[in-house]
Amino acid sequence: METYGRILLVAMPAFLILVLFEKWYGWRKGKDTVDNMDMISSLSSGITNVTKDVLGLSIGILSYGWLVQHLALVEIKNHILTYIIGFIVIDFQAYWVHRWSHHINIFWNRHLIHHSSEEFNLACALRQSISSILNLFTFLLIPAALLGVPTQVIATIAPLHLFMQFWYHTRHIGKLGFLEKIIVTPSHHRVHHAINPEYLDKNLAAIFIVWDKWFGTFQEELDHVPPVYGITRPAATWNPIKINFQHLWLLMQDAWRTRNWWDKLRIWFMPTGWRPADVADRYPVAKIDDVYHFEKYHPPHHRLLPAWSWVQLTMTLLLISYFFGFIARIGAPDMFVYGAFIFLSVYANTELMDRNANAVYWEGLKNMAGILWIVQTGDWFGLNEFLPGGTQILMAYFVIATIAVAWFCTAIQKEDSRPNIAL
């Protein structure tokens, strides 16, 4: 937990710099692929994901350590070879988990967030799940366990394997020659994120594209079929916490509403998107039928809102950086209080981005909670020792943020009372 937090202290600024560089590069070249509000939503999603991971909010049904202890047939002495084997097995696991996530209703909920952006850029790589609470797929690592690959090796490779999937989420890199035959490239992954019928559910590999070629899920990017990005049932929100549970909520509603008891049971394991016929007729869900003619989600907003959203995001990034740097000192149960505050910050900010007037209540709740914590404890999780006067700065921010969001929400309410007049 503490080690992963320190890794993220290096990784997060690096990812942010690369995301901003892509924004600048696209603007410089006249091909900006990074929408401002979409980028903030993606970065906010990344914040919730890493917070969940650092807090260890997931349950492994089967431990890899247990597999090694009980199944290992040999012990490979070559240190480099254990890492190579571990990497290949993790990549094999990633392919099949990814494939099942695209094809089975209940598993799609854990992956939908990653595809929810209607853009394709480095920022959307950070849209990762907070709904994958149960880890059911450790059994796919049995080949590594049989060969005695140590637990520490797997634990080291896993985050590196994830970070290596960041770079190919871009439209600024074309095809890469012979590498297209070996590894996943931006061209391959553009296909994967596309909702064109030709591209849907293709190129599921994480690092080695050979898995797709061997198991029949490979599709080359076609010059005459430009990829269109997103999901066929649009998320229609910037709020990553809502997106994480949209599909699950629909499944729960459908299972409750259908009159067929068999459908109530099988809906969870049917192909992604399947709904009971009686429910689909009575409760239709908006779906993109023509991928080349639909309106991307971009609600109107006050001209100052993007700048304010960046202020809020920057404060959240500073708070989470402090959290990761001092998580051992913060300790339990306070670290879970801190994590909840981060989630509340993301929820409040993205509700305002969605132009929801109720954002003022979420923002007020967040800031009141922060103020009460400082008043009761006299500090912000030890911040005064690290930064004298830090709690006073935070208190001022909480007050200013409440006033600012109240002002934006008042503007939203005035706009709603005068339709067809832009803010």
Image (spheres, rainbow, N blue to C red):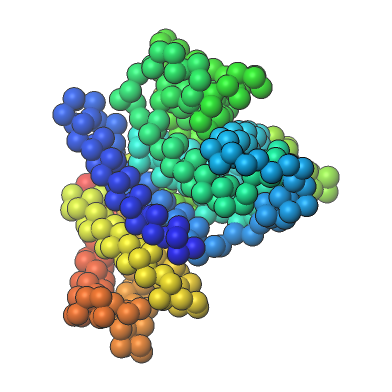
Residue farthest front in this picture: 77
Closest to the observer: 29 or 173? 173
Describe residue 242's horizontal placement relative to residue 299 as left or right: right
- Residue 23 lies, with reference to residue 346, above or below; the image says above
Tell me where residue 14 appears, x and y as whole percent.
30, 46
Residue ID at (52%, 33%):
206
The answer to whether residue 58 is seen in the rendering is yes
Tell me where residue 178 appears, x and y as whole percent.
44, 13
Residue ID at (54%, 62%):
56
Quadrant housing residue 4: bottom left
Describe residue 338's horizontal placement relative to residue 409 as left or right: right
Closest to the observer: 135 or 177? 177
Closest to the observer: 355 or 379? 379
Residue ID at (77%, 42%):
73
Describe residue 323's horizontal placement relative to residue 88 as left or right: left
- Residue 136 lies, with reference to residue 403, above or below; the image says above
Closest to the observer: 60 or 169? 60
Quadrant housing residue 186: top left
Residue ID at (32%, 74%):
367
Describe residue 272's horizontal placement relative to residue 330 as left or right: right
